């Protein structure tokens, strides 16, 4: 085992002080994840440290945080891959801090809710038990449905930094997931929801979201497809 120093942002509401950095020195195996290190601190050094975690398998997205200057999942980030004995951990940027590494993700999930994230198959016979897709139609959803709602992309988006009402890249990626689904027949309604100043046109294609995504998804590409289809289908709002 080797010795590592973890510099972690601490903040407690109502304490009367601003956020500050607290350093913990622990012994850990190089193969440990950052989440393993946080658990070591929580269980054996300082039980007051607050952070989110759940599945430990890179599925739930709960443990997203900024590690050495980059948004990552703590459970998937091995300390040996960071190649440093000092690790700096801060909350996801540009979200309000609730406590320590826990942030308020309400603006993020409001963006997700605003695009009506569910399949809308109007006019389908309710007695029909299945809506069969061809293999080719199903393949169009690859790269669109795998989002785990960790918030890393939205936290890294300059458009969101300047306007918290922006739906965000995760919401627009999810919108394209339904727009591309052969079973969904509410395209015009979905376009109307995202064809707004706080919707798809707020994206300036900086590609921060692509770099930040722990699942290697490409929200920027999905957003560009939405823009092209809006123009192609003649649904671009009149300026």
Image (spheres, helix red, strand yellow):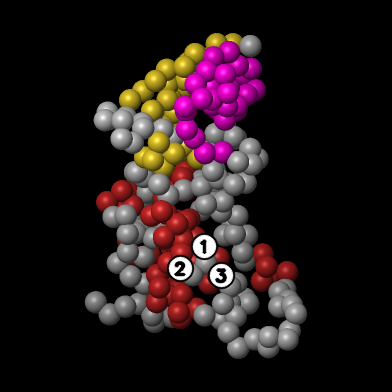
Image: 146 above or below 62 = below
Q: Residue at x 62, y 76 (%)?
A: 182
Q: Which residue is mark 1?
A: 174
Q: Please give the label number shown on residue 161.
A: none
Q: Earlier in the sequence, mark 3 or mark 1?
A: 3
Where residue 169 appears, as percent x and y from the top left, is 43, 56
Where residue 116 appears, as percent x and y from the top left, is 49, 70
Evaluate if marks 2 and 3 touch, with contact meaning CB atoms under 8 Å apart: no
Q: Which residue is mark 2?
A: 115
Dot 1 surroundings within 10 Å: few (below 14), some, or many (20 or more)? many
Out of 201 and 87, give the one closest to the viewer: 87
Q: Earlier in the sequence, mark 1 or mark 2?
A: 2
Q: Residue at x 60, y 55 (%)?
A: 146
Quadrant where the C terminus sits is: bottom left
Q: Secondary structure at mark 1?
A: helix
Q: Which residues are magenta?
A: 26-53
Dot 2 surroundings within 10 Å: few (below 14), some, or many (20 or more)? many
């Amino acid at each position: 085992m080797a010795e590592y120093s973890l510099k972690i942002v601490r903040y407690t509401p109502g304490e009367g002080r601003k956020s500050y950095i607290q350093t913990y020195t622990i012994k850990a195996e190089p193969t440990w994840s950052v989440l393993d290190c946080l658990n070591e601190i929580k269980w054996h050094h300082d039980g007051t440290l607050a952070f989110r975690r759940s599945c430990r398998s890179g599925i739930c997205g709960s443990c997203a945080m900024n590690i050495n200057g980059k948004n990552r999942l703590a459970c998937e980030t091995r300390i040996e891959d960071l190649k440093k004995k000092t690790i700096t951990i801060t909350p996801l940027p540009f979200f309000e801090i609730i406590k320590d590494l826990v942030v308020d993700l309400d603006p993020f999930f409001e963006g997700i809710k605003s695009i009506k994230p569910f399949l809308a198959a109007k006019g389908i016979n309710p007695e029909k038990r299945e809506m069969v897709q061809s293999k080719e139609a199903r393949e169009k959803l690859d790269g669109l449905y795998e989002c785990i709602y960790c918030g890393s992309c939205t936290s890294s988006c300059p458009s969101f930094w300047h306007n918290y009402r922006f739906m965000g890249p995760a919401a627009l990626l999810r919108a394209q997931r339904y727009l591309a689904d052969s079973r969904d027949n509410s395209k015009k309604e979905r376009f109307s929801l995202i064809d707004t100043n706080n919707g798809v046109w707020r994206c300036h294609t900086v590609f921060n979201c692509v770099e930040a995504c722990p699942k290697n998804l490409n929200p920027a590409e999905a957003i560009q497809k939405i823009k092209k289809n809006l123009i192609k289908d003649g649904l671009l709002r009149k300026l």
